[in-house]
Amino acid sequence: MNLKKLAKILGISETTVSRALNGYPEVSERTRERVLAAAQAAGYRPNPMARSLAVGRTNIVGIIYPLQPNDLADPMFLDIVGGMSEALEAQQMDMIIAPASPANELRSYERMVTGRRVDGLIVGRTKLYDERISYLAQQGLPFVAHGRTLLQQPHAWFDYDNEAGMRLAVARLVSLGHRRIGLISATPDMTFVRQRIDSFHAAMGEAGLAVDPDNMIDNAHDRRAGYQAMQRLLARSPRPSAVVVDNHMSGVGAVRALLDAGIDIGRDMSLIVWGVMEDSLAGYNVTTVHQPEPRRAGAKMIAMLFALMDGTPPSELQELWQPVLLPGETAGPAPA
């Protein structure tokens, strides 16, 4: 059964049948009900490609991502994308991930928007003043930012509470008697990194502790950089008695550096890592700031994107989830 035959059975035009099936408002409710009932009785199934063309939809959601080698081995990234894929599959939609170099990323957005290649976008790794979001907010294409910015343009976003998570980590170490606490962080032009750094300073200040700038190392976003950053902290005198690592990829490198240096983690030096760590890393159950349910988070971002497509104002689609501290063996009392 095709559209032409269905229209002939009903004795109305193919255009009217098509508009009734696709929910156009100019079709009366009585006609719509008649068409839907006849389509169901005849076992009619619309051609997805034809329907997409008729309503101006691609049935595709896009992510433009400056992929790094670590991303394909990052369980958090894969879980979030997996949750997005499942949510889209349930609606018979697809997702594309378009790698782009940082220098050409904005141009990739422009091509995607002007070519109307997708119905919506997820924007990751947000920056403080993000030109991608500023551009998209002016274009009218639905998008959800995975992370916040300092931009004033209303837009939909999903994030975990980075400030609260860092406070949990610092409070845990302070309660264990630590006074010299270091921080290894990723690239500070990303919003989540700046939020965590600022929260680290605030939490230390509230505990009456000074922050030693030499115990703060940034631009550590992978295992190698995490390893080198921890080596620098170990070489200090006096060195920190505890360190927070604000991302799990460099956290793996930091743990390896401690092990190679013969450090008894949790006794000689304490460590808290933000994000997913292996259940057992070289025999240690790592204390972590955990972002719960990443697959559900991915599905939530897709649900927010669908809401935008249905006309919900972006200012009503801003979601902040709370991280939790998962105790492990790597955060212990400060050495005497």
Image: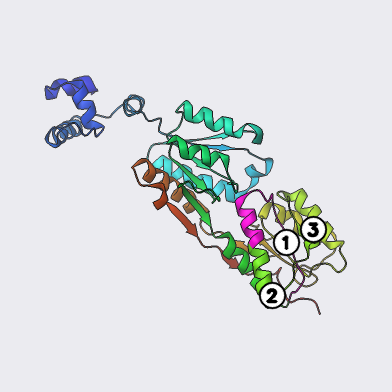
For the residue marked with disc 3, what is the amino acid?
A: Met
Q: Which residue is mark 2?
A: 174
In the rendered structure, which segment of residues is drawn in magenta? 178-198
Please tell me in which quadrant of the rendered image residue 164 appears: bottom right
Quadrant where the image shows the C terminus: bottom right
Mark in front: 1 vs 3: 1
How far apart marks 2 and 3 lie (CA) works out to 20 Å
Q: Residue at x 52, y 62 (%)?
A: 322
Label 1 to label 3: alpha-carbon separation: 10 Å
Vertical arrangement, residue 315 with respect to residue 107, above or below: below
Q: Secondary structure at mark 1?
A: strand
Please check the rendered image and state whether residue 105 is part of the magenta-colored stretch, yes or no.
no
Q: For mark 3, what is the residue?
A: 230
User: Decide: marks 2, 3 in contact (CB < 8 A)?
Assistant: no
Q: Specify the farthest residue to the bottom.
A: 336
Q: What color scheme is it?
A: rainbow
The single residue placed furthest to the front in the displayed view is 152
**Left or right side of 228 for 33:** left
Residue at the image point whose x is 63% and y is 70% from the top: 327
Q: Is residue 151 left or right of residue 116?
A: right
Name the foreground residue: 142 vs 94: 142
Q: Position of residue 283 (x, y in %)?
A: 73, 63
Place residue 333 in its image quadrant: bottom right
Residue underneath mark 1 = 183
Seen in the picture, residue 323 relative to 187 is either above or below; the reply is below
Which amino acid type is marked by label 2?
Answer: Val
Q: Secondary structure at mark 3?
A: helix
Percent of width and height locating residue 106: 58, 34
Q: Position of residue 265 (x, y in %)?
A: 77, 67
Q: Earlier in the sequence, mark 2 or mark 3?
A: 2
